[in-house]
Image (tube, helix red, strand yellow):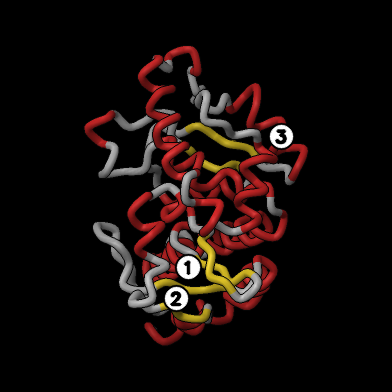
Amino acid sequence: MDQAYHRYTEADHLMWRQLFEHQMEQLPRIASKAYLEGIEKVGFVSAHIPDFNRETNPKLRALTGWEVYVVPGLIPHREFYTHLHNRQFPASSWLRKPEQIDYLEEPDMFHDTFGHVPLLSNQSFCDFMAHLSAVALKYIDQEEVLERISRLYWYTVEFGLIREDNVLKIYGGGIISSAGESQYCLQESVPKIDFDLARVLDTPYHIDRYQDHYFVIQSYDQLYESVTGIESLLDRYLASEV
């Protein structure tokens, strides 16, 4: 699919600006350094919606070899992980309307693009995504195993926290793009758990409310290194079901 950039209206660009500026009022204090640097590297600004073909993808390809790939919305697991394996991040091209500003049933372009794309400028994070997608494709027909892989994706790429200079920061795109969860997840009363691969794979998640807890990594290198042994864990789950 093509982004069809010319179809965006003034109202669409205004919505992007409102969402962008609202989040950027708080993200410099609470977001990961790699994410904030990524905003600059990929050239995101409040003035207009990113043009994937002319602006975003040329910069991403030069940085890490990745690109944004337009999809109509949520896509099947096989298609999703195939795109990631090909270093293509699936992103919607439609943007929420004013009446949807606080709640969406499925991710829109602001979530997919503003939330996720800046970190695609970080090589360790990209290496994690590439390796995870290769593992997912290996087990793509094993529903129980694929669910566990989805938990890892959820608690990292979507809702992960990182400790930088002994301070908790957010990096997951689901948090980054959510004004409410950006504040909620860092409250002292919300449990934070040091990242442990086996525990993450065993922990279900919620899609309809804020998470009960969040997993904290120490670095993006740790995230990448964590998946090097994931297949042995997944094979154990398969063996236990026989």
Q: CA distance from mark 2 to mark 3?
A: 34 Å
| Visible residue check, residue 142 | no
Q: Position of residue 13 (x, y in %)?
A: 43, 22
Q: Position of residue 217 (x, y in %)?
A: 57, 73
Q: Secondary structure at mark 1?
A: helix
Give the answer, above or below, for where 235 lies relative to 11: below
19 and 96: which is toward the camera? 19
Rendered image: mark on residue 13: none
Rendered image: mark on residue 59: 3
Rendered image: mark on residue 201: 2
Amino acid at dot 1? Leu
Q: Residue furthest bottom?
A: 240
Q: Secondary structure at mark 2?
A: helix
From the viewer's perspective, tell me whether residue 15 is left or right of residue 164: left
The residue tagged 1 is 152
Label located before the other in sequence (3 or 1): 3
From the viewer's perspective, tell me whether residue 122 is left or right of residue 17: right
Q: Secondary structure at mark 3?
A: helix
